[in-house]
Amino acid sequence: MSTDSGWFDLPGEASVGELARHLLPTLKAPLVIYLQGDLGAGKTTFARALIHALGYSGRVKSPSYGLLEPYSAGGFNILHLDLYRIESPAELDYLAIRDLFDSNSILLIEWPEKGAGFLPPADLELHFEEAEERRYLRFKARSNAGRVAAQALGAHPAAG
């Protein structure tokens, strides 16, 4: 398997949390992670698991209506975006992402294709899929920082 890409079988929500915890040692800011997949495929579940794994103990809300939820955990500023409801990528200017995203930030973006041209490029792409009542995750590194994370993911025992 390439160290830049691979896939996982995610049999349940606990496996998503385990995957997020496995990724922790590789996280270095700034980092941009695109979370892709259909509705209900596991994007928000993964974001929630990663934010909690970083040590955030409060409620992690889905940013579906507010578009952006900021958190501070694990020494990082975490910005969780959900762009499902935006009509135009230009709407991102109102969120001031460029001002919020700094050298200590991890940016988790659901539905990044809706923000094309207004978002920083992905370091790591995570694509969640459902087929035959199972969930899967495909991952792809897009930068050196993404390769470090992808190598850790590829070393996970559940990687295919």
Image (spheres, grey):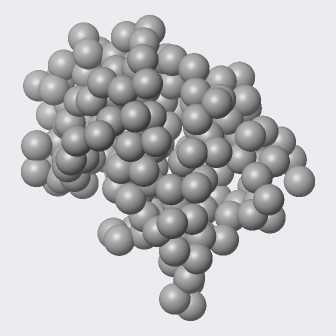
Where is residue 97 drawn, in percent x and y? 25, 21
Where is residue 109 drawn, in percent x and y? 37, 41
| Residue 149 in the image: above or below residue 155 | above
Q: Is residue 122 left or right of residue 61?
A: right
| Residue 101 in the image: above or below residue 118 | above
- Figure quadrant of the C terminus: bottom right
Q: Residue at x 22, y 52 (%)?
A: 62
Where is residue 72 drawn, in percent x and y? 30, 24
Q: Nearer the viewer, residue 46 or 53?
A: 53
Q: Is residue 154 left or right of residue 124?
A: right
Q: Nearer the viewer, residue 113 or 55?
A: 55
| Residue 120: quadrant of the picture | top left
Where is residue 23 drawn, in percent x and y? 62, 40
Which residue ends up furthest to the bottom in the rendered image? Answer: 132
| Residue 80 in the image: above or below residue 127 | above
All told, the count of numbered labels is 0
Mark yes or no: residue 119 visible.
Answer: no
| Residue 152: quadrant of the picture | top right
Q: Residue at x 50, y 56 (%)?
A: 17
Mark yes or no: residue 71 visible.
Answer: yes
Which residue ends up furthest to the right in the rendered image? Answer: 1
Q: Residue at x 86, y 47 (%)?
A: 2
Q: Is residue 67 left or right of residue 151?
A: left
